[in-house]
Amino acid sequence: MTVKDLLGEESFQLINESSQMETEITKPFCCDLLSIAMSKAPAGAVWITVMGNVNTLAVASLTETACIILAESSVLDDTASEKAKTEGIPVFRTEQPIFEAAVKVMKMMEKKG
């Protein structure tokens, strides 16, 4: 499954498209603590968080995260929005809680797999 496949799920709204939409997703990853995400987020993960700041995007870039889903209606601040565009990081948002969004991603992956 690729990042682009998330577009087919109506509960995920794309807020920053990038050239990385064909990146293969390895697994969902849930974490709101940046230091843990920095050390444990696997490359290719869909990182589901409520943290919509520039530090989140820096960690996503560092860990080679496939994309970010901002849960619970979180949004990117202006600086983070610009960073997402500059770094080419796909970002989605959802009203769902973190866990429910991760389960939805996992179910989508199982269907594709």
Image (cartoon, rainbow, N blue to C red):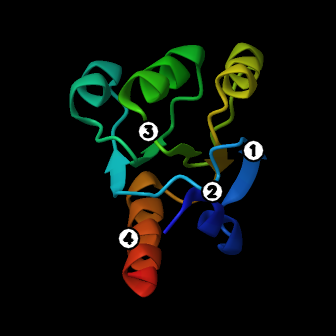
The tag earlier along the polypeptide, 2 or 3, is 3
Along the viewing direction, whichever of 47 and 74 lies nearer the viewer? 47
Residue 30 is left or right of residue 17, and the answer is left
At 57% across and 49% down in the image, what residue appears? 72
> In whole angstroms, how far apart are the C-alphas of marks 4 and 3?
16 Å
Which type of secondary structure does the marked residue at label 4 adopt?
helix
At 29% across and 37% down in the image, what residue appears? 41
At 64% across and 23% down in the image, what residue appears? 87
The tag earlier along the polypeptide, 4 or 2, is 2
Residue at the disc numbered 3: 65
The tag earlier along the polypeptide, 4 or 3, is 3
Circle 3: residue type: Thr
User: Are the residues at dot 4 and dot 2 in contact (C-beta closer than 8 Å)?
Assistant: no
User: Are the residues at dot 4 and dot 3 in contact (C-beta closer than 8 Å)?
Assistant: no
> In whole angstroms, how far apart are the C-alphas of marks 1 and 3?
14 Å
The tag earlier along the polypeptide, 2 or 1, is 1
